[in-house]
Image: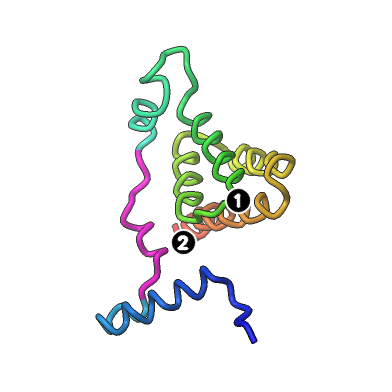
Amino acid sequence: MTDPTNPFEAMMRQAQEMAKSMNPALESFSPKGFEALWPTMPKEFMEMSFGKGLNKDGLDAKTRLLITLCGLTMQGAQNETQMRMTVRHALEAGATKDEIAESIGMMSMFAGIPAMTRAMEFARDVLDEGKEKDETS
């Protein structure tokens, strides 16, 4: 009988077993930990790099990041790290929670409800992080 697990899950499990055999300290390794290594860029830097610094009459950084979120959702929201980082950067660039939710929600018409739901879960993770920080402050 065939193994009903997802091929990606099997590959990840195999990679984790290999890592554990090489270095037992890697047993608790989580790719999500890499996100903490990439800080959120300041709004001014994003505006200079991705916004009107390129074209004074062009899109601002917030709009470009919302479009990026739509594109990532259209791809099926496959890259959760990139989705969460883009949400963080969009917030930093001035996007509201409603604008982020609306951008992702609009993709249900183009990418399908499963992709939109997955993207919304990743966005909610980031938005909930903000709530936790507010509650502890």
Instruction: Residue at the far left: name it.
Output: 23
Disc assigned to residue 89: none
Number of marks in picture: 2
Please report whichever mark, 1 or 2, sits nearer to the chain's N-terminal start: 1
CA neighbours of label 2 inside 10 A, class few (<14), some (14 to 19), many (20+) = few
Front in this rendered view, residue 106 or 36:
106
Q: Amino acid at mark 1?
A: Gly
Q: Amino acid at mark 2?
A: Thr
Tell me the quarter of the picture where residue 49 sits: top left
Distance between the Cα atoms at labels 1 and 2? Answer: 34 Å
Looking at the rendered structure, the secondary structure element under dot 2 is: helix
Q: Is residue 40 left or right of residue 67?
A: left
CA neighbours of label 1 inside 10 A, class few (<14), some (14 to 19), many (20+) = some
Front in this rendered view, residue 1 or 66:
1
Instruction: Report the residue at 50% width, 75% height from top.
Output: 10
Span of residues in magenta:
29-41
Q: Residue 32 lies in magenta, yes or no?
A: yes
Looking at the rendered structure, the secondary structure element under dot 1 is: loop
Q: Position of residue 114 (x, y in %)?
A: 69, 55
Q: Position of residue 19 (x, y in %)?
A: 31, 77
Q: Which residue is mark 1?
A: 76
Instruction: Report the residue at 55% width, 58% height from top.
Output: 125
Q: Residue 129 lies in magenta, yes or no?
A: no
